[in-house]
Image: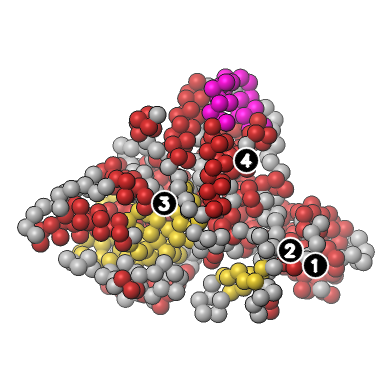
Amino acid sequence: MTEVSCRDPNLVMRLARLGSIHQSRLSFMRILTRRMAREGWRFEQTAFEINDQGVGHAVYTAHGPERAYSLIAYAHDLPAEKRSDRVIAEAWDATFTLFDGIPTGADIERLSQNIPVQEAGRVKGTELSVSRANRSVRLWEHVVSKLAAGEQPDAAQIDAVGYLMRTTAVYGSGKLGAADREMIADRPEFRVPFQVEMLSVYLTRWFVRDLVQYMADTRAKALGASAAKLDPDLARSMGIGNSTGLGMAPFLLNHPVLFSNWVQVRETALQRVRGVASATADEIAVFNDIFARNKQSVANWHSEHPVQLEKLAALQADVDLISAKLEDEGLAQSSPWESLYQWSTQSLTVEGQEWLVSLMLEPYGDLVDDLADEMSADNTATFRIAGAMTVARLREVLQDVYGWALKTDWSLAANKARAWYVSEEKLEPRLGERFEEPIEEYEQPLAPGRDATQLFAALAHWPEETPVAEFLLRHPEHRHSVRRAQIANRAPYAEIRDNTISEDVLPIDMLRCKLAFFGAMHFDPRSDRWVRICMYGNAPYPEELSTRDGDFWVYPDAQSVAKEG
């Protein structure tokens, strides 16, 4: 191994780079499927009580080494006029909860009065998540009608959408009375963040496949015929869609320690791989295989949003540059990954650089996968302000973490054009125009750079050896900024080093960053504030986990890539 440092937070934590992160082997979906395959989880459908109108419930149970978890799915006959992906919707095509253990009939009955109404209902500690989903209406009808007619659905139509249902919310961590994370965080299978939510979505996909087949069978039976069975390859190509809006964006700002741990793990993994002195033939073969498959994945990525179209064009050009580089030089030289990384910083766009970073980790599961257990966080201690810190030291921290902000002219309207607030109706985050809407008095503390600059100015005339506690007794309005600065001093990747209220801020950069850590691909922004993605596309279904790859499923199948080539 050669000595390599982790990348500077001032480089990594810019919004343009965070908004260019790609899924990797340290993404939450892949961590889960890898674990389930390795540990030999067993799955069973224990109930499927759905009537001919597609209304009823089903239960799917996952048996891990020590515990079982059950997805309870409620299917509804939703009128078209009530179908909406907006958070203010009050009815959905299907609603779900992930139950801790195996539910009794009484549990299913109790939850049938609460899960279908979502926010209007209440659950308890035996429920780990609450979620809902809507059909992709045109593709759903296409698949049902084709199967009912004894034919397979059109692969091109499936590819164009990618999913039969899309979730509009997957709630965990105490939402609506569900179990708090602290109740389950010590379980090995849930030590990594968001494993409850990822398991819920994984089992939801299984239910959706079964439901569409059942509806096709029912329609064919009514005609005195038999439906075709959905081709396994077509079924596998479909994931679960997701519409993610502005409400998710503040998460990264509101969970600085957790966010820092995610980025720290990714950066430590990159550091380890860059330090590899030489690559073995097997490691090079894995990289070349995944490179070819990921190259095809980029070619399959479509969007109509101008920002994403520009990034896609740049990424495709970058992929060609990497191909040429590999053909010319290969990876047999000493420190191959460090050499390739350093070349990328001079030759590729930020999008291409981060795509390559994720790719470089793929051959090195033995080297980096253990880092996954370091991605969670206990925020309790971080909320205690260290009152003994001196004013001089606090100034140093502010200059280090918020240097970019101290150089920003905050008197310019363009630099503070936006304001984050919470809507009164749905208690959801919103981003408004500061100088066009009466929202400033409701502004949330989601502009750390501006607030840190105000703190720095307030410290100007305080003696250097003064304890921070003494300063805060006089200026309690700066407590949140002092706390954030002290957190960033201990957690180097805690703070986004960019202006989150400027006129040109793109919230989708924050959305994409979080979703990439989930494991999402093929981001399709519909505006600068919401994005559609697909989860678990091409993943093995539960009954296939023992026979198909539980890790590299995110990339197109090697055989299909060979045919394309």
Label 3 vs label 1, nearer the camera: 1
Disc 3, SS: strand
**Residue type indicated by callout 2:** Asn
* Mark identifier at residue 411: 1
User: Disc 3 designates what residue?
Assistant: 535
Label located before the other in sequence (2 or 3): 2
User: In x, y percent, where is residue 214?
Assistant: 20, 57
Highlighted range, magenta = 321-342
Whole-number angstrom distance, CA of label 3 to CA of label 1 = 43 Å
For this view, does 60 lie left or right of residue 258?
left
Whole-number angstrom distance, CA of label 2 to CA of label 3 = 35 Å
User: Disc 4 designates what residue?
Assistant: 349
User: Disc 2 designates what residue?
Assistant: 415
Label located before the other in sequence (2 or 4): 4
**Residue type indicated by callout 1:** Ser
Disc 4, SS: loop
Q: Quadrant of the C terminus?
A: top left
Is 334 within the magenta? Answer: yes
Q: Residue at x 85, y 68 (%)?
A: 458
Label located before the other in sequence (4 or 3): 4
Label located before the other in sequence (3 or 1): 1
Label located before the other in sequence (1 or 4): 4
User: In x, y percent, where is residue 120?
Assistant: 40, 78
- Mark 4: few/some/many CA within 10 Å (<14, 14-19, 20+): some
Residue furthest to the left in view is 224
Disc 2, SS: helix
